[in-house]
Image (spheres, rainbow, N blue to C red):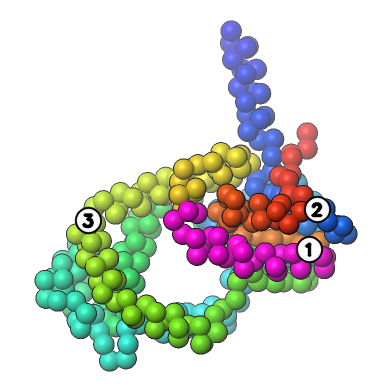
Amino acid sequence: MTKRFILSLTIALAAVSANAQFLFRISGKKIKAPSYILGSVHTLPGALLDSIPEYLEAEAKCQQLYAEFDISNQQKIAEAQTAGQQAISLPDGKTIFDVLNMEQMDMLNYRFKEVFNVNFTDSVMKAVWNYQPNVLITTFNLIFTSQEMQKHPELGMIGTPIDMFCINRAKQRGLSFGQLDEIQPEDKLKKMRDSLNAKIDVQVDSLVAFLSDMDHRKQMIADEMNSVATTGTYWKQGDYNSFAQSEYWISQVNKQPELFKARNERWLPKIKTAITEAPTMFVFGAGHLVGPSGVLQLLRNEGYKVEQIKVKR
């Protein structure tokens, strides 16, 4: 019985690890050589890739790399931060005190004191008084996420994260580099800012609801981080099917069409062009692989063969 159990366990583990970690080959449609997609988990260290022979073999064949954007380019990051700062600010001359009533401000101040140990109305917080209400929600979410990540040391970024790791190594090898996303031109940022400002009352309602139900929101983030930790396990095992079928990621993709579906569709022409130019490694978040609007299915719809690479034994 013991031998049978060990044999069954060995077979099960072999089945789970029969695929390389979210690594896919693109071929067909008369492209000269295959290209590859690495679905990344942004919190995992890139050094893990050195222990995956299938990835190293694919990487060596590629002549260019495309990532979501160049997170190694400090100037571009600074430009994006400046543009983003402009987009998330209230109209000139307005502060949060102009859009929240006294009762709402008291609630915000109470929660800030509870979470950050500082009164929002203190002068040390003056730099963020002109932020839109949604930015304050994001601020709370970031600290709650950070607190939850400390409970999952397996997600800690020990060393360089996967996406940055791939970008740095591609540049060291002298490969061509491309971005699937671009920093938005100033006119688009202005339109986005005007659109957001037109919905300030909706943002206020969202902020008040968030502050009133903060314990529940914290629990939601804890549940999400547990799901992300599970995703990291799936990735390390190469178990893409379990990842793609998980309720968490299906719901994330469906709830955020602009983050996933719309971006995937914008990326597709760049991907199709790149794979006709040269063997290319694409590195982006694994969530963009999932479902009928995922990059894998979009490529298949175009007639390409896309298959997860098997581990050699």
- In the rendered structure, which disc, 3 or 1, sits on the residue that comes first in sequence? 3
Highlighted range, magenta? 253-278
The prevailing secondary structure element of the residues shown in magenta is helix
What residue lies at 70% left-to-right and 69% top-to-bottom? 270
Task: Residue 60: give x, y in percent of width and height.
Answer: 80, 57
- In the rendered structure, which disc, 2 or 3, sits on the residue that comes first in sequence? 2
The residue at which mark 2 appears reads as 27
As helix, strand or loop, the secondary structure at mark 2 comes to: strand
Q: Answer above or below: position of 254 versus 139.
A: above
As helix, strand or loop, the secondary structure at mark 1 comes to: helix
Task: Residue 223: give x, y in percent of width and height.
Answer: 37, 46
- Which quadrant would residue 295 be assigned to in this image? bottom right
Q: Residue 128 or 34: which is nearer the viewer?
A: 34
Report whether residue 221 is seen: yes
Tag of residue 275: 1
What residue lies at 38% left-to-right and 57% top-to-bottom? 145
As helix, strand or loop, the secondary structure at mark 3 comes to: loop
Residue 126 painted magenta: no
Task: Residue 63: give x, y in percent of width and height.
Answer: 81, 65
